[in-house]
Amino acid sequence: MKISITSNIPVVSTKLLITPALINKALKIAVKKSALLVERYSKMRSPFDTGRLASSINTRIGKFTATVSPTVDYANYVHDGTRYMRARPFMTQGLEDATTEIRSVFNRAIKGVL
C-alpha cells in the first residue's frame, strides 16, 4: 500500500498574493455602491419644495472612503432643525434606509473574493 501526499503550493501562493488586491478592489467598489445608496435614499427623504436641497446631495469617493453631503447652505438647519423649525434628518434617515442593502453589498463583495 502506498500513500502519496502532494501539494499545489505554487498555485496557492500565487492566489494568496493576488487576494489582497482582489479584496482592495472589492472593498473600493462596495464603498462606492454603499455611498450611492445613501445618496439615493437621502435624496428621497429630503424635504421637497424646489428640489434644490435634494439635487445638492452628492457623493465624493476616496480610496476606501466616501462622503455623502448636501452643498446648499441651509441643509444643516433643515436636517438638525432650529428653535423655529423641527428637525428633518433626511441624511440620517437615508443612511438608515440603506443599511440593509449596504450590508448585502459588503457581504457580496467579500464572498466574491473568497
Image (cartoon, rainbow, N blue to C red):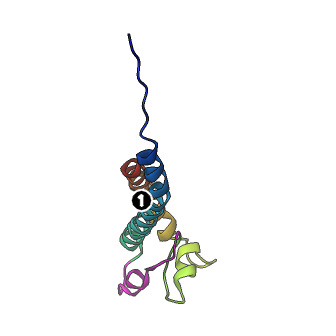
Q: Nearer the viewer, residue 86 or 100?
A: 100
Residue 30 quadrant: bottom left
- What residue sits right under mark 1 in the picture? 98
Q: Residue at x 55, y 71 (%)?
A: 87
* Mark 1 residue crowding within 10 angstroms, few (<14) / some (14–19) / many (20+): many
Q: Is residue 107 above or below residue 52?
A: above
Q: Residue at x 41, y 72 (%)?
A: 39
Q: Is residue 89 above or below residue 105?
A: below
In the image, the segment drawn in magenta is 48-64
Q: Residue furthest top?
A: 1
Residue 44 quadrant: bottom left
Q: Position of residue 42 (x, y in %)?
A: 42, 70
> Is-magenta flag for residue 58?
yes
> Is-magenta flag for residue 52?
yes
Provide the secondary structure element on which disc 1 rests: helix
Q: Position of residue 77 (x, y in %)?
A: 57, 80
Q: Residue at x 53, y 86 (%)?
A: 74
Q: Residue furthest front?
A: 1
Q: Is residue 93 above or below residue 46?
A: above
